[in-house]
């Protein structure tokens, strides 16, 4: 059972006063001291005044128009002007819903019951990037809301949807501060420079890159286009004093394949690699660096575990950081702590609060190792055959990768009676029969079709994980066999 499947406690009292937690102070305490070399965006250094002066003007306008807990939707590319708005909204106790800059804003505004929408690409809404950078007092339009204010929720962030349908998760200041307090001291950010490329609309980018970098006393160099071009990242690291970098494993693989990429990673003083399982190749590239493996979910604000610098092995998640974590029923990694999200936002019901002392099953299978955890797949990947036989597909797939030399693996059943195993290996060869038997165990007695495919078969998410839903019915027999 996931956190938001539990029976919710009643919503917050609409009259509950806003009581500021340390988040705004933690984030802004170092900004004045950073001087003119504060924030880099699209090739231009901006001084602290470019951030704080517009933020104060936003505070005046927001404070005269909205009340603590009013929800605002912010959908814009990362920029100093947008950060000015975010800081002002935190100071005023607003609930900030974050989205990508190319989405249906009218639909999302209805989903989160936003009182105001700020975007940098849609003329129907206030243009945050222009208005926040102006000396004039910013102006924006408000919407009618259906639900009372939600002052305890500081952020509404959507989950990635890799373990089911995407949903809005509500994070409180207590949630976010707990993760910053447990992670920032271990990252050595003071006086450093973060090469920032992750989306702020995702919890990894918002909390563990942006807010952690600011509260840890680091400067920020923002890569254009969300760092999709590894050559640009390497060039920025060569032209600026970059010390820290956060990334998903797919970005590390791309960097490692470019000239200068491994040298860039070797020079870093810190950063977190997370969001998807650590592949064998990424483990080899990062072993001995000062980067850390990290694990978390939006529901965990998003920090659960952190590895030591340079400690990498396939599927390594790290050790509990700032919370309790253990292997629960069915082998599911479970946690409890101040990082457990405040609740969820339901477009039909509003804010649904959850018991802060609850145990939260992550939906990820793991095993204990070295005082921490190793990922073994998603519990949702398991399935039953028509005869009731349970197939732990994720564990078998991980075994084929770690023991059978597979680069990618998918075990599925499309008729409920027989199994289909799809593999990609480095040399294109089928694993030995004894290896398949060891990984599949008693399932070898069932009708089994083995398909060897090349890399073009695999559809992956933006984080680099295999997209099981999109591959569910794709016919491997029509793909070009691996050479």
Image (tube, grey):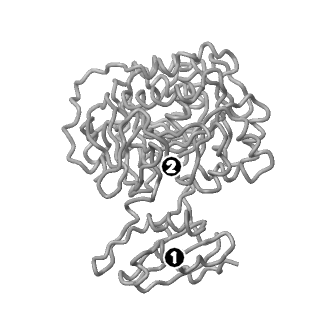
Q: Secondary structure at mark 1?
A: helix
How far apart marks 1 and 2 lie (CA) works out to 44 Å
| Residue furthest top as drawn | 33
- The image's mark for residue 349 is none
In front: 220, or 350?
Answer: 220
* Left or right for 222, reference 471: right
Label 2 neighbour load within 10 Å: few <14, some 14-19, many 20+: few
The residue to which callout 1 is attached is 436
The residue shown at (30%, 32%) is: 150
Q: Secondary structure at mark 2?
A: loop
* Residue 321, percent from left and from top: 44, 35
The residue shown at (38%, 60%) is: 379
* Residue 453, percent from left and from top: 61, 76
The residue shown at (75%, 43%) is: 232
Disc 1 versus disc 2: nearer the observer: 1
The residue to which callout 2 is attached is 103
């Amino acid at each position: 059972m996931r956190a938001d499947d539990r029976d919710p406690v009643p919503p917050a009292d609409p009259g509950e006063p806003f009581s500021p937690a340390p988040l705004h102070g933690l984030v802004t305490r170092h900004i004045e001291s950073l001087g003119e070399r504060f924030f880099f965006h699209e090739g231009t250094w901006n001084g602290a005044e470019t951030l704080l002066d517009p933020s104060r003007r936003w505070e005046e306008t927001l404070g005269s128009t909205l009340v603590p807990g009013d929800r605002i939707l912010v959908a814009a590319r990362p920029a100093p002007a947008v950060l000015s708005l975010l800081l002002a909204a935190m100071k005023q106790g607003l609930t900030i819903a974050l989205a990508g800059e190319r989405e249906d804003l009218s639909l999302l505004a209805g989903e989160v019951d936003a009182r105001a929408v700020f975007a940098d690409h849609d003329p129907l809404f206030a243009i945050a990037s222009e208005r926040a950078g102006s000396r004039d007092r910013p102006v924006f339009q408000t919407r009618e809301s259906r639900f009372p204010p939600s002052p305890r929720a500081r952020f509404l962030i959507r989950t990635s949807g890799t373990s089911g349908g995407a949903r809005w998760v509500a994070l409180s200041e207590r949630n976010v501060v707990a993760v910053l307090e447990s992670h920032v001291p271990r990252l050595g950010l003071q006086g450093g420079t973060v090469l920032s490329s992750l989306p702020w609309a995702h919890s990894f980018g918002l909390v563990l890159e942006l807010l952690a970098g600011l509260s840890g006393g680091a400067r920020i160099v923002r890569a254009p286009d969300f760092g999709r071009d590894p050559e640009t990242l390497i060039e920025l690291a060569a032209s600026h004093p970059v010390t820290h970098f956060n990334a998903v494993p797919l970005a590390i693989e791309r960097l490692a394949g470019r000239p200068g990429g491994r040298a860039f990673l070797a020079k870093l003083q810190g950063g977190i690699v997370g969001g998807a399982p650590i592949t064998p190749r990424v483990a080899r590239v990062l072993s001995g660096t000062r980067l850390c493996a990290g694990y978390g979910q939006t529901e965990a604000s998003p920090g659960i575990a952190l590895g030591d610098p340079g400690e990498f092995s396939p599927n390594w998640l790290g050790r509990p950081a700032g919370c309790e974590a253990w292997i629960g029923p069915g082998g599911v990694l479970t946690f409890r702590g101040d990082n457990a999200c405040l609740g969820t936002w339901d477009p039909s019901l509003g804010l649904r609060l959850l018991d802060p002392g609850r145990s939260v099953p992550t939906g990820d299978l793991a095993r204990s190792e070295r005082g921490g955890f190793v990922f073994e797949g998603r519990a949702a990947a398991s399935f039953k055959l028509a005869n009731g036989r349970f197939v732990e597909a994720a564990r078998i797939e991980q075994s084929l990768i770690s023991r059978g030399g597979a680069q990618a693996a998918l075990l599925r059943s499309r008729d409920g009676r027989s199994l289909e195993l799809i593999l990609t290996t480095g040399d294109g060869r089928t694993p030995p029969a004894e290896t398949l038997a060891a990984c599949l165990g008693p399932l070898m007695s069932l009708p089994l079709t083995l398909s060897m495919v090349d890399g073009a078969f695999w559809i992956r998410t933006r984080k680099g994980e295999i997209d099981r839903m999109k591959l569910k019915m794709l016919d491997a027999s029509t793909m070009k066999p691996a050479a």
